[in-house]
Image (cartoon, helix red, strand yellow):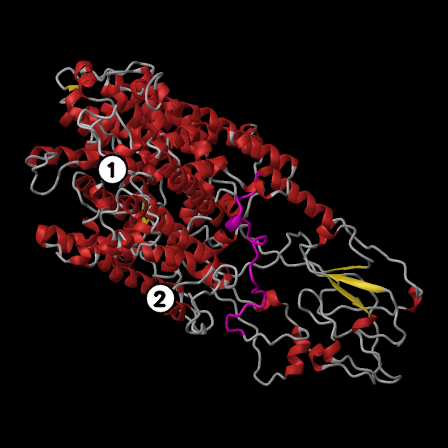
Amino acid sequence: MSRPYSSAGSNSHPPYMDPRYQYPETPTTASTSTSDAQWAYGPGSRPYTGAGEDLYEEDESEDEDVFAYLPPTTAEQQAAQQQQQQQQQQQQMHIQPATAPLASVQPVTYPNSRPALSSPTPVLPPTTPVHPSAARHIDTPDSLVPPESFRMRTLKERVPRQNKTPEVHVSLEDPDPELGRLRPKRSISSDHVMEELPGPSELHDHKFAKTGDGATLSSLHFTSSRRSDFSVEYEPQLEEEDDSPYPEVRASVSNIDDPEMPALTFRVWAMGLFLCMLAASANTFFNFRYPAPSLAPLVMLLIAYPIGKFLAFALPIYDYQVPRWLGGGTFSFNPGPFNIKEHVLLYIMSNVATAPGYAMNVIIAAEEFYNIRLGVGWSICLMIATQLTGFGLAGMCRRYLVQPASMIWPQNLVVCTLLNTLHAEDDEPARGGITRFKFFLYVSAGAFLWQFLPGFLFTALSAFSWICWFRPRDLKINQLFGVYSGLGMGVLTFDWSQIAYIGSPLMVPWWAEVHVMLGFIIFYWILAPIMYYKNVWNFAYLPMSTGGPYDRFGKSYDILRVIDIEHHSLNVTAYEEYSRLYLPATYAITYLLAFSISTAVLVHTILYHGPTLLAGIKNLRIEEDDVHARLMRHYPEVPDWWYLLSLAIFFALAMISALVWPTGMPWWGMPFSLLLPTVYIVPIAYVYAMTGQPLNINLLAEVIPGSLIPGKPLPNMIFKSYAVQSLAEALTFVQDLKLGHYIKVSPRATFMVQMVSTLMSAFVQVGVKEWMFRNVKDICKDTQPQKLTCPHNRVYFTASAVWGLIGPTRTFGQGATYHPQLYALLFGAIIPIPFWLWQRKFPQSRLRYVNMPVLLNGPMWIPPATGINYSSWFVIGFLFRKFHTLSVFLLVQAETDVRFGVLEYVVRRRNFRWWSKFNYALSAALDSGTIVSVLFIFFCIQFPLGDKGWIDWWGNTVHMNTADYMKLPYLKAPPEGFS
C-alpha cells in the first residue's frame, strides 16, 4: 500500500513542537518615537529591533555560570539551594510602618492583563490624558526574544516557579539580603510619579515607573498630590524556561522532543552495519602500521550524513504489511526524511565498534612474540568477552551516570552541537551574521587547508620549539623547552591535533582545565626538573621524558635478553647479569600519580558522593529531573535484568576463554579482574562525566596480576586486557547512553545498536587479523616494506614482559629502586580529607572547589604527551573563556558587527550569546576538518608515494637537528653502568 510522501519523521510534529521552528517576532515600526520607545521599554532603554538582539544579554559573571568555572553541585548542595529558594518564596506581604496614614494612599493598578493581586481598579477621569503606549499591548522581553534554532539563547536570570503570576509585596526591607539577590526588585512609591499642579495630570517619560519584567506602569494614577512614605514593592515573577540548569547543555542540546520521530529504521541498520564493518576493518589494518591514521567516530558521523540524505531520496516510499506470525504491523524502507535520531544511532554504533579491541594486543603478542597459538575460537571468545562485559556494568550504573542532570559528559555536547547543526534546516543567522551550519562549513574548510601546513608542508609548526632551533646543543634548553623528550615549556604549537591531543580545550569545563594545568605544573614543570637535576633515582643518566624503560647503560631496555622464549619465563641469570629496569623522570612521576589516584578517587567519591550512592542503592531519587529526563519518560526503559543477563553471559564467556584453553590463568583470576572495573566504574565515571578527563586503571591492572601471578606473561596480559577493556567499554557505553538521553532516543534502541554493532565488530576485527597474518609477508617485522611493523603490539609485549616476567616486586618491592612510590597509595587516600573537612567547616570557602582526583589525573597523558600539549591546550581554553583571540576573519564571519582589530574580545563573559551558539560548533569543525585533512594527506600523498611523499627542506628538518629530538640525557652513563 503506497502512501504520499509527507513530512513524517523528523518533521511530523506541528510547527510549535519543532525545535527548528522560529516563533514570530513582535513587529516594531520605524516610526516609533524615542518617547514611545521609553514608554514601552523603560527609561534609558532602546526599542527592540527584533534582529536577534537579546535584551537580557549581559556580561556573564562567574557566579552565574557555575558549571564553566566551578564543579557541578552535589546532591547535598542542591538540597541546600532548594531550601534557600523555598525560604525566599515564603516571603509574602511585609507591611512597614509609615508616617502617613494608609488611608491617604490611593489604589494602585498594574499593567497588562496579569494583575498580581485583586486591587480595585481606579476610574480615570475623562479629562486625564493617557499616554498612547498605555493603550496598546505591552509584551514582556521574554516574549519578544525569539528562540533561535535548537534553543540557542542567552542565559537569563530565572527563578524556578510554579506560579507565573507577578506578586506585589509591601515591605520596608528584605529580612535577609541574600534571599533576594536571585530576582530583581522594583520599588514603586510616590517618588516615581511626577507631582503636578491641580488639574489634569500626565505621567512623564523621565519619571516613568517600570516593573521588573518589562511591563509599564502606565495606569498608575493618584488623585492626591501629597507624597507618602508608603511604598509598594513590585516583585515580578521571572518566567522560568524548562531547560537544563547548566548553560553548556542549554547551548548544545534541544529541550524539545518529538516522540513520533522514527529512530531504529532500516536505514540505521543498513548504514550502521556497513559503516561499522568498514571502519573496524580499516582501523584494524592501520593498527599494525606506523604512521597511520584512524577513522574516528566523528568522521563516520560526517560520512553518514550524505548517505542518509541519499537513501531518504532514493529508497521506495511504501508501507509493507508484516505477517501476523512476525508480529504484524507495517514496515517501510523509507519512513521519511533522514532525521537526527537516526543519525545519533549511527554515531553510537561507530563509537562503540570501530576502535581496535584491547584484546587484539594480547592475541598478537601471544602468537607473534611468545609463539603461543590458541586458535581463532579463543580469539573470538576473548574479543567478545572483553568488549561486552562492560556493557552490563554500564547499564547497572545508569541511574547514577545518565539520568542526573549534573552528569554533563562534556564530550557529548560537541556531538550534539554537530548533529543539531547538520539537521537545523531553519538555522537563521543572528544580527545579520551567519548560521551555525555555514560557520561549521567555513571553519571545517579552513581547518582542512591549514592542516597541510603543520602536517605536511612545514611540520616544525607542529613541534614548535623555536628556542631549541637556535640552541640545538644546549641540553638544559632542549630538556626544558623541547617537545620530543623535553617538558614543552615553549607553550605554543600551530597544530590543532597537538592542541586537542588530550581533548578539545573548547569542550572541557574551565574549572577542570585549571585543575589539570595546575597538576601538570606542580608535578612536571616543578617536581620533575628538581628530581632530574638532583639525579634522584639516576634520572639524569636518562632522557627527561620518554615512554619506555632503560637499562643501566642509559639505553632502551632490551627485553629479549632476559626472556626464555621457549618456556615463556624470565631468565633470572641473564637478568642479573644484564640490568634492572630504570624509568625516566616523567615516566616515574606518572607511576607515582597512578598510585595516588587509585586511592584518591575512591576516598573522594565516598566523601563527596556517598549520600548520592546510598540514595541510588535505596532506589531513591538522586536529583530532581531536568527537562531531558522528563522527556525521556515517553520511552520505555531497559529492564535491569537485560543488563544483568548480558553481564552474566559475557562473564561466562570470559571464564571459558581463560579456562577451556591452556592460558595458565587460575580460576580466580577472571573474577578478580572483573572486580577492578566494578569498583572503579562509578568513581571514574563521575570524574569523566563532569570534566571530560578519563581516568584509567592500567597500573593496577599490571601490578596486581604481576604480584599474584608472577612469571606468567599470558595470564597477566589476559587479566590486564579484561580489566582495562571492560572499564573503558563501560565508560563508552554510558557516554553513549547519555548521548541518546540528550537526543531523546529510546533506551531500548540504544541498547540494541550498541549490542549488535559491538558483536559484529569483534568478528570483523578477528577476521581482518587472520587474513593479514596469512597473506601479508613479514608482518610485524622491522623489514616489512609497507611498514606493517605492529608498533602498538610491540609496546604491549614489552609491558607484559616488564610486569608479567620481571614483575612489580623487582621494581617496586622492598629494597627496589622505586619502592618509595608505594607511599603514594597512602598519600592519595589522605589528601582529599583535609579539603572535605575544610569545606564542611567553611562552606563558602574557595577550597570547596578543589577536586584532587582531577588534579592528580590531569597529567596522566604523559608520556606520550608532552608539555606543549598541555600548555597550548590550556592557553586556548583560557582564551575562549576569557578573551576572544580568534583571527579577524573568524570574528567577522561570526558577527558582522564586530569591529576590525578587536582581538581581545571577551567571548564567554562578554559575548555569551556568541559563545553559546558557536563554541561547540567551532570545536566540532576544527576536529572534523583536521581529521579529514590528515586522512587526505595520508591516503592521497604519503601512502601512494611512500618516501617521496615528504618534502626535504628546513621547515621539515629543523626540529630534528636538536638534542631534544635525539633524546640526549643530562649526564653520560659510565661504561660499566650507573647502578
Say which quarter of the image contains residue 145: bottom right
The amino acid type found where label 1 is placed reads: Pro
Q: Secondary structure at mark 1?
A: loop
Question: What is the spatial separation of the Cα atoms under label 2 and label 1, in whole angstroms?
Answer: 50 Å
Q: Nearer the viewer, residue 602 or 529?
A: 529
The amino acid type of the residue labelled 2 equals Lys
Q: The residue tagged with tag 2: helix, strand or loop? A: helix
Q: Residue at position x 71%, y 54% from top?
A: 180
**Residue 91 part of the magenta segment:** no
Q: Looking at this view, is 784 or 205 the one in front?
A: 784
- Write down the residue under mark 2: 438
In the picture, the disc for residue 969 is 1
How many circles with numbers are drawn on the protein? 2
* Disc on res. 599: none
N-terminal-most mark, 2 or 1: 2
Q: Residue at x 86, y 57 (%)?
A: 95
Residue bounds of the magenta highlight: 50-74
| CA neighbours of label 1 inside 10 A, class few (<14), some (14 to 19), many (20+) | many
Is 61 magenta? The answer is yes
